[in-house]
Amino acid sequence: MKNYFIAKSRRLRSTPYTSRIEKQGVTAYSIYNHMLLPAAFGSLEDSYHHLKEHVQIWDVAGERQVEISGKDSAKLVQLMTCRDLSKSKIGRCYYCPIIDDNAGMINDPVILKLQEDRWWISIADSDVILFAKGLAIGNNLNVKIFEPNVDIMAVQGPKSFKLMEKIFGEKITKMKFFGFDYFNFDGAKHLIARSGWSKQGGYEIYVENTKSGLALYDKLFEEGKELNVKPGCPNLIERIESALLSYGNDMDNDDNPLECGLDKYVSLDTEINFLGKDKLKQIKKNGLIKKLMGVIIEAKEINVSKSIELLDKDNLKIGELRSGVYSPHFKKVIGIAMINKPYYNLSQTFKISINGTIFEGKVCDLPFI
Amino acid sequence: MKNYFIAKSRRLRSTPYTSRIEKQGVTAYSIYNHMLLPAAFGSLEDSYHHLKEHVQIWDVAGERQVEISGKDSAKLVQLMTCRDLSKSKIGRCYYCPIIDDNAGMINDPVILKLQEDRWWISIADSDVILFAKGLAIGNNLNVKIFEPNVDIMAVQGPKSFKLMEKIFGEKITKMKFFGFDYFNFDGAKHLIARSGWSKQGGYEIYVENTKSGLALYDKLFEEGKELNVKPGCPNLIERIESALLSYGNDMDNDDNPLECGLDKYVSLDTEINFLGKDKLKQIKKNGLIKKLMGVIIEAKEINVSKSIELLDKDNLKIGELRSGVYSPHFKKVIGIAMINKPYYNLSQTFKISINGTIFEGKVCDLPFI
């Protein structure tokens, strides 16, 4: 596959870490929420093995926050997500599908409850702030909505606990998954969550004080030397093996959360009021017409830059591949595909054309590992 | 400046023209509305000279449409823009700032009135569809909002009129600027507007029938051979010389339309109801605190990937450069800058650091040419 350059401009915003990662050897970018998101530091496979064994520091500032505060903030946040947040606690993160009145996915953020009347929606790649503003204005809600200066760096990998303990002490290793708390560094207080877009363990540091955050970035590399720390980024192989869904890749506004397998984040049997609730009830009653599934393909290489059709033996389309990568673990291509009814049963076989060659594949469960 | 690759994925959507422009030598992409937007076919300066003399075909499918139809569609569209659309006509395009309740810019689309109750908002780079949906839901408006399959190709340059006449006949040369009409090609009807993101003249073809659109794309190159047609894309030099503003580059949600010099699209002395109207009246009464201006810098090269501070002789910040490029016409760097009060008077001088070297510059009017 031929490579193309990215044309930088202010519209594709830099992060506070950009100048550092460019010195550290970033080779490719994606764009996420109008911001540069590192996508490779040389070999994807080397970085995958390193992530699974050691510790990496990621510039994921593209995971922007939408801050919603004020008297009606809880009401607005609940209106936007089909997950019941009525029992949510301060100091916890919640993975929440955001859907519109037609139940179409708009985003799948992690929502942080900072206070009873102050929330951060840590968003995937769509302008949730505009949806929130529109809803707030239209419903005449008493809220303040803005994008704060928060630039997340993630510390990911099995040695992340050891590294963070060296800097913040034992307390940080006691934090539960999807909990967050505040930690001091270099005169500033940082919100740190036990979270991150890998299944290798780690933290996300929500940097508000840029100066202190940059000092912390450097400190992490200094203290991490003996742990073989490296710069990194969300890794396509690791995230597909772990079935961490990517909004815009695996799902979009034409899909609903039930089709995406997010049933446990859909709270239909509650009294809470959210957009798309009636539509979701109707969808559940009628049954799904497509479903997000794993696929394993007997191939050694793939580059998915758009949906690729999956065909049955009679060349009828049974679904489409939306993400895919060669997995060193399975020694095959694995991927995430939207499969039409009735083909989304396990072990359904299909054909797929990759660069003009036909390969065999079969449908499987998610996650792979 | 070091170059970085773009990491392609389904999330950064391809267009129907992507495979064609990749065969035709595209070298760099930007991302626009989650879609690949070609940013270079080799030399920016060669393409600039070619655009000003001949004719180019551009893949600008990233200019997505937000379709709003239904009984309350005119009400919703007017609510979103500070430009008075009460006398707008079917078959015309309108450049319209979209602002929020705080008068902050959200987008600066061209709005096409298709019917009295059917509109296309042809957007710059932000998810206007989410703002429209939120407002419609919150206000309980009777509208249908979606992103139709429309992939614009632009025909730009002084010879675009001759080229389009060869295919569509003399009628198309009679169309007025910012008018649109429907033209047949290869069994399909195409909406074609006399518009485009250059000041060199031309058309934008709103392709809904992809098959016919691709045939038309090929036909334009075939018929254009004798006119020296080439593939191209919005050109940074040409657009800055012409002061075509770019949302996200030159202005963003922290700026209001008066600060951006868009006064003639701000209809405060009317009875119409739009978001941010009271706020704009207050801003107008209090006076501006910053203003978008042109700048000329005594340098031969610049790459603007983020705001660059402009300093007065005492090293006080007087504003920031947001876009900039070397202009072969002026033989200097020109740019678009947000200048703080009271420094936005013409001929104000400043200093700017470009790659560690200090250059002199001065404030000027827009457009340059």
Image: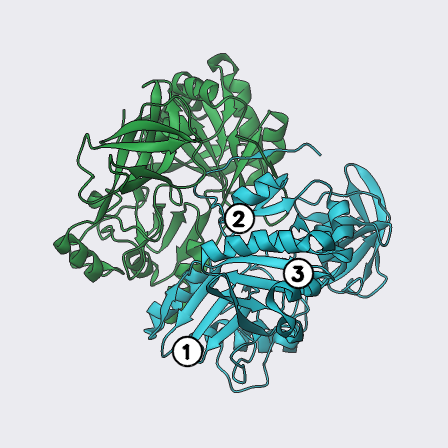
Chain colours: A green, B cyan
Q: Chain of mark 1?
A: B
Earlier in the chain: of badge 1 and badge 2, it is 2
Element marked by disc 2: loop
Front-most of residues B36 and A316:
A316
Please name the residue shown 64% across and 38% down the image: B27
Amino acid identity at mark 3: Leu
Is B363 drawn above or below residue B304 in the view shown? below
- The numbered disc on residue B245 is 3
| Residue that badge 2 annotates | B17
SS at mark 1 in the image: loop
Task: Please tell me in which quadrant of the rendered image residue B355 appears.
Answer: top right
> For the residues marked 1 and 2, what is the alpha-carbon distance in whole angstroms?
31 Å
Say which chain tag 2 marks. B
The x and y percentages for residue A63 are 45, 42
Q: SS of the residue at dot 3?
A: loop
Q: Callout 1: 10 Å neighbours few (<14), some, many (20+)?
A: some
Q: CA distance from mark 3 to mark 2?
A: 25 Å
Q: Nearer the viewer, mark 3 or mark 1?
A: 1
Residue A81 visible in the displayed image:
yes
Q: Nearer the viewer, residue A368 or A70?
A: A368
Q: Amino acid at mark 1?
A: Asp
Give the Cα separation between the discs numbered 3 and 1. Answer: 29 Å
Chain for disc number 3: B
Q: Is residue B355 above or below residue A330?
A: below
Please name the amino acid that badge 2 sits on.
Tyr
Is label 3 on the same chain as label 1? yes
**Image height check: is B113 above or below B230?**
below
Q: Earlier in the sequence, mark 3 or mark 2?
A: 2
Residue A345 in the image, given as x and y percentages of width and height: 17, 36
Which residue is denoted by mark 1 in the rendering?
Answer: B117
